[in-house]
Image (tube, rainbow, N blue to C red):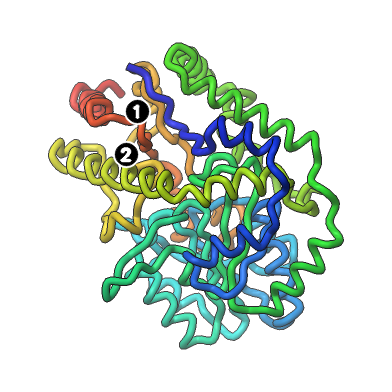
Amino acid sequence: MSYFRIKIYLHFVDFVKSLFISNIENKKIETLIKKTSKKHNFILTSQLRVGFLILLQYLKKKFPFKKQIIFQPFNLPEMINIADNLGFKPNFIEQDILTGQPNLKSLQKKINDKTLAIIVTNIFNSPKTLLKIQKICSKNNILLIEDNAIYFDNFFKRNNKKFFSGSFGDYSLYSFNIMKNISGFFGGGVSTNDKKFIEFAKIKISNYDSFKKNILLKQITIFLILKILSIGIFHKIFVKILYRAHKKDNKTILRIVYPSLRFKKIKFPNYYFTKISEIAKKVIYLQLINTQNRSQNFLIRKNNNIYYHKLFKRLKINGVKLLRVEDFNFQNYMDFPILVTNKEKLNNFLLLNNIETKYLFYHNCAKIFGNKKELKIQKNGKYFSDHVIGLPNHKKISKKYMDKIGYTIKKFYEKKVQ
């Protein structure tokens, strides 16, 4: 039994179709996104981080004296690097150990008259926490920017109405890169009610170059390789290579598998300043209009998350902790997160048993960009970096395979394999 952890939601048929259909107008995609974002405006960008870059350029011009932006420490370093490069002061808040969500007391202590915005990263967040952060932002006259890269299509219900992730922020960021549940080769965007930002962004993007063909070709090649690796026999070979890379700390291979390991504090690369490619727009559109497939994938992930949660509750493994889940519709994880001790050794043991996990989510950005005096927050970010792994979750992951994962992890801790 062999299951590839990575699920590329873009079907090969849609990829082929995108090569022959006419170009898609931006408005068609914008209309579809606005249905879930509940915002009046949406603009497409070549990547989420490009949308974030343009947004911060706009806010810097609009609020020249507000220099502080608040982040969660367990985060993608490229995002904080954008703020840092633009002259903002990144500041970090604690994340709750039981939930992984922003600690509200820590947030309130960080806010001052220089605070421009808080960036909430939807990786563990619940609607209850986001609604509270909304109120804090409104009360203190600061902006809420919602990083909705991973939660797309997730929702909660209130008074029988659906409220989707991405609808909380004054500005909400979207990603349609290859690993997301709407898989473009590249792609992102920003939703907002701020028309002036949209006008600003359109002018910026109009001066950008066309997307680099060599980068697009590289991403299409990765797409095809990942599709091949989902075939059982090829996946087994991949897992063996990955196991050896971890054991020997082969950074060349590990940086290919985990691109964020390649991060360096540098200025903006040239490919940031490009428009979204026409092929990316077409494959994004084809997936967005397939609402039946989106709903099916959503329900499968949700049921898998519930099954994992019940499984680990029942197994009661000393060495594994579950993050608190308030709403499985909203906290509908693409990879089911657990907190583990001896993460590296557990990962190697699982790879030996032909089980691949999402070994690396984000990094401890408080250590990379934070104030060295704030050791508590650095330790908080380090805690999640050292302990979180993600278990595979998509329609090819059966209950039998989830049981195998759970009992293999139990075996590791009970037999003290570490």
Would you say residue 243 is visible in this rendering?
no
Viewer-closest of 183 and 91: 183
Mark 1 vs 2: CB contact within 8 A: yes
Q: Which of the 4 image quadrants contains residue 82?
A: bottom right
Residue 30: x and y in percent read 61, 63
Residue type (three-letter) at the residue carrying disc 1 = Leu
Q: Residue at x 38, y 68 (%)?
A: 163
- Residue 337 as seen in the image, left or right of residue 144: left
Q: Which residue is under mark 2?
A: 340
Sequence-first tag of 1 and 2: 2
Residue type (three-letter) at the residue carrying disc 2 = Val
Residue 233: x and y in percent read 45, 11
- Mark 1 neighbour density, 10 Å: few (under 14) some (14–19) many (20 or more): some
Q: Residue at x 83, y 62 (%)?
A: 206
Q: Is residue 354 above or below residue 150?
A: above
Would you say residue 312 is visible in this rendering?
yes
Q: Say which quadrant the N terminus sits in.
A: top left
Q: Which of the 4 image quadrants contains residue 372?
A: bottom right
Q: Which residue is under mark 1?
A: 346
